[in-house]
Amino acid sequence: MERSARTYASLISEPLTYLVGFLGSSGKGLLDQQVAQLRELNDDVERLEIVDVRGKVVLRAEGNNVVLFGDGLESPVVEDRELLRAISGLEATAAQVTEADGSDAYRVVAPVVKQWGEHVYSLVGTFTYANVDRQLRSSLWLSALILAIGLGLTHWVSVTLAGGITRDVDRLRAGVIRIQQGRLEERVSIDSRDEIEELADAFNLMADELVATIRQLREANRELETLDQTKADLVANVSHELKTPLTALRGYLELMAEGGLGSISEESIRAVMVCRKNVERLSLRVEELVQLSRLDRFTSLDSAREEIDLKPILEGIIDTFRPRMEGGGVHFVLQMQPNLQSLEANPEQIERVFLNLLDNAVKFTPQGGTVLVFAETCDHERRHGVLVRIQDSGVGIPPTELIRIFDRFYQVDPSSRRRFGGMGLGLSLVRSIVEAHRGAVWAESEEGIGSTFFVWLPFGDFAHDVTNKGGPSVRLEEADGDRTAAREV
Amino acid sequence: MARVFVVDDEPDMVDLLATILKSDGFQVDTDTDGRSALARLLADPPDLVLLDLMMPDLDGMELLKLLRLDAKGANVPVLVVSARSGHQDQLGTLQLGANAYICKPFSPRELVRQVRQLLETSEAETNA
């Protein structure tokens, strides 16, 4: 607006001044007409004034009203100093002003300078912002309208679209929940021809796969169960098939050795003793295999656990070994702390642990050596329990081998298989059993001096458990006891 | 003289058990078949039964159940002889009505000890 106002003012300043001078008061009608025409050239013009350089207003055109001062009508005098300075200046100026009614206006002062430099009048044009405001307002209105329509449209689109999406997503979600609840045969049907439909298709495909996989797993599991049962039956049969002849051998050999079948020669007795020793060894191996296969099947769960005392177990084992030790000239010492708390354990398995460890100790201790067994209360990893030490004066185990002796089928010296028998299962079985009882087993050894095996087992009363971790696991084991009962060999 | 009835499908085992018991002064009857053994047991109940668990046709468990169901066999002491060393097996047999359990391979001395003990307990109960 400002620029057009300035151009307009400088354009009309000269013709208007000329018109005033030429027509004067005599041609007032014509002047009015001409002024009106000039005014029509600019929409924003509010008032046009011709003022002489001294500040006297010669003409004032405001609205349709054109007033010519001079003849009998006294000219008003411009008093505003700034305006006066602008009027007397030779350069066109423009300024923002406030009108008497308080509205903003734009005032342009354009001096009318004749060719020879004479400067008598200036045009003071006052322009209103009303049009601009109106335009601005209308454009604001338009913007608001567009915005409103846009928002409305957006809302509609989103509600329509999102509503559809939400519905589809809800359906998908319901499908997921159905699958979660195990209704695997249910599928999701969405026909939205967009990503949601693709998602639903993918979901259905996944459900199909799931059903197929589950069917496969069920079949595999059934096969495994059959296999497991077959294995259990096999172990039962093998143990029966091996143990029955062993019983016959052992029984007759013992009867012979004790003279129950009549007297036999000294040499025959020695031969019978050798047979007995070997039958005993064979029995141990068979029992070991049976135990190991059972542990493999149930790991820690094969635990019909009960309150047991170590003392009778250890004494019983030592009794079993006594003929062998006396024959081999090995001295045996058992030392137990009196009134040891009882353990909650599987008696057969615990017996197996000490049977195997003592078997090793006796096996590797040379004639005249000693096997010591100590049992005493001992805390291990902040839990109360019993520590059993089995110390032999045998050949010892090299340090590098010490960590591997509990591995299955591991033997320190391959030739020991020939020399001492065994399949390298004894110690791995010991470890499996002890760990299944939440205990620990380790060994120390010095070559040429002997080895000491340590077995730590927690006390049965789990209320004394310092860490209090015992509770849930005990319940678990009890719960599993029932399950194993039916399947035990 | 106490009468012991041995039931085992293995002739060698029957022979061994009979030898051990006879040498200790028991009177011994034997049978290698479950069904005929059951019939003989019920017809003339002995003082004690030595029973093998794993037998073809009628196995030890079944025989024990049937024996206990009959009034004549309900109170005869039964010592089970088995290759199964599982704790649960022992418990199961005892629940079925066996009085004791001995695992193969056992020593003759242990067998005789258990037989004597069972007979003593049974006698004490009968007298009481």
Image (cartoon, rainbow, N blue to C red):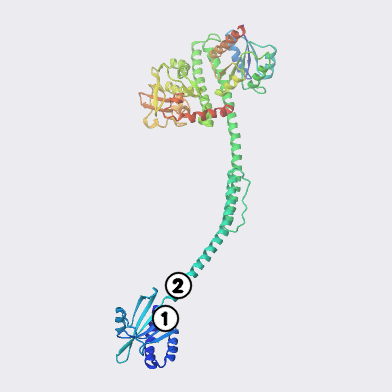
Label 2 environment density (alpha carbons within 10 Å; few <14, some 14–19, many ≥20): few
Q: Nearer the viewer, residue A349 or B21?
A: A349
- The image shows residue A272 at horizontal and vertical percentages of 51, 15
Q: Please give the name of the residue rendered at 62% of the width and 44% of the height, measured from the top-left corner.
A: A183
Query: Do the residues bearing badges 2 and 1 touch, measured as CB atoms within 8 Å?
Result: no
Label 1 environment density (alpha carbons within 10 Å; few <14, some 14–19, many ≥20): many
Residue A45 disc label: 1
Mark 2 vs mark 1, CA separation in Å: 18 Å
Q: Quadrant of the N terminus of chain B?
A: top right
Question: Relative to A43, does residue A444 appear above or below in the rendering?
Answer: above
Q: Nearer the viewer, residue B63 or A191?
A: A191
* Chain letter of the residue beneath label 1 in the structure image: A
- The image shows residue A93 at horizontal and vertical percentages of 33, 80
Disc 2 marks a residue whose amino acid type is Leu
- The image shows residue A257 at horizontal and vertical percentages of 51, 12
Is any part of residue A390 visible from this angle? Answer: no
The kind of secondary structure element at disc 1 is strand
Give the label, 2 or 1, closer to the camera: 1
Residue A200 disc label: none
- Judge if badges 2 and 1 mark residues of a common chain: yes
* Lower position in the chain sequence, tag 2 or tag 1: 1
The kind of secondary structure element at disc 2 is helix
Disc 1 marks a residue whose amino acid type is Val
- Residue on which disc 2 sits: A136
Q: Nearer the viewer, residue A185 or B51?
A: A185
Say which quarter of the image contains residue B29.
top right
* Chain letter of the residue beneath label 2 in the structure image: A
Question: Relative to A37, does residue A338 appear above or below in the rendering?
Answer: above
Say which quarter of the image contains residue A192.
bottom right
Question: Relative to A62, does residue A154 appear above or below in the rendering?
Answer: above
